Amino acid sequence: MQKTLPFDESFVRKLAEEYPTPFYLYDEAGIRSSCRQLNAAFEWSPGFREYFAVKALPNPWILQITKEEGLGADCSSMPELMLSEAAGMTGEHLMFTSNNTQGHEYQRARDLGAIINLDDLTHIDYLASTAGLPELLCFRYNPGAAREGNVIIGRPEEAKYGLMEEQLFDGFRRLKQAGVSRFGLHTMVASNELNGDFFIETARMLFDLALRLHSETGVRLEFVNLGGGIGIPYRPEDSPVDLAAVGAGIQQLYNQLISGSELDPLRILMENGRMITGPHGYLITTAIHHKHIYREYVGVDACMSNLMRPGMYGAYHHISVLGRENDPQDQVVDVVGSLCENNDKFAIQRPLPRVEVGDLLAIHDAGAHGHAMGFQYNGKLRCAELLLREDRSVQQIRRAETVDDYFSTLDLNAFRAQV
Ligand SMILES: *Cc1c(COP(=O)(O)O)cnc(C)c1O
């Protein structure tokens, strides 16, 4: 798929006069369009709801947009719950899919009326003793060797998440005995999965399990949550997931397995992050150095503290050199940041047009798990986030960090005063 940009060089250059690079630029129109495509794929399923995985882009201005498109919020920590509440989401518009959870976080989820997704059998008693049991509870299922996983999420049988199948039967019985009256089942076995059939298989697995749980325990699930993980075409040669085909495939299974059974109507939920905002965020950075040693390096003013996916997963992020889109890509370079770690590279041995110092680079598909994974190691500061509105205006939705922010938890003056 041809990689395109919703802006050109002169637009970004003007923006960079007001907001120094590096910064993130998010495209509101694109985010809305992703939400609509996913909702359209499940239009046949009246109870369908996508809960946007807040960890992908935890900013209330973004959550306001996804909320307006009918999405809920999937949270796994107290601050994520607070962000979602600020954006107007409470009650069953919140999914709390956490693991190794602390009591005060369960308490906040309970206070907000979020759907709580339990990660272990022992969490039943833990929740009961810390926050009390709500009327609705969900379990996270780990299918183990039955499913494959991938490099980002790992193999299910090695993953710390969820309950094994046999534990679920026991778990739902115990919930029922404890007075819980409404039930859901969740799984999350893929991340950045581009094969749409994978999600149809996940639906089949959960439909089948829901039916067996019903016949063996009498528990009637009201929803299955297929998790997130729909992939995006990071590489030009990748194809996006055909959402309509995924929706239609799951509809066919629903008609076969669930329609007319005692589980009908069974709501279908998802909690994608990446596919909603990923393709619609760009890390904008300026080329500041050229270096020629054993390899050719282009040094930019962003580093892996702004976007660590390449360093963490070896992930590919497409790079456009703004204004040079039609130049021949005849230079093979590593595009690097300034962190003292050799995996601080946005691209390795990548053919690019000739990059001059001062050129602006757009790093594509950085709208999910991008800024959010930022850190301050090596004294690096997190950059600003800007939102390109549908009317082409630009709003700063998070300012860049300053040195004062860096020292805000460490009182340098008090230290100086005592020496
Ligand atoms: C990270 C995560 C998601 C979102 O994953 P994407 O790959 O961004 O779609 C959803 N649910 C849970 C529990 C997660 O940990």
Image (cartoon, grey):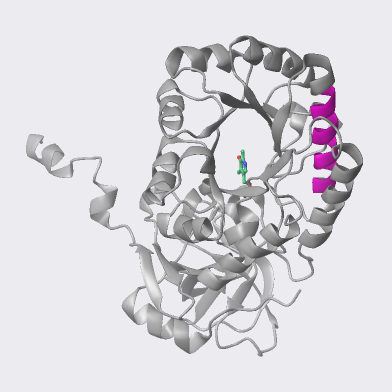
Q: Position of residue 408 (x, y in %)?
A: 24, 45
Residue at the (60%, 51%) spot, across then down: 273
- Determine the image quadrant of residue 381: bottom left
Residue at the (66%, 56%) spot, across then down: 315
Q: Position of residue 2 (x, y in %)?
A: 73, 77
Span highlighted in magenta in the image? 199-212
Residue at the (69%, 40%) spot, across then down: 153
Tell me the quadrant of the picture where the N terminus can be found.
bottom right
> Is 184 located above or below residue 131 in the figure?
below
Prevailing secondary structure class for the magenta stretch in the rendered image: helix
Residue at the (47%, 33%) spot, across then down: 113
In the displayed orientation, state which residue is furthest to the left. 417
Q: Is residue 286 left or right of residue 167?
A: left
Looking at the rendering, the quadrant in which ligand 1 lies is top right
User: Looking at the image, can residue 110 be seen?
Assistant: yes
> Is 56 located above or below residue 25 in the figure?
above
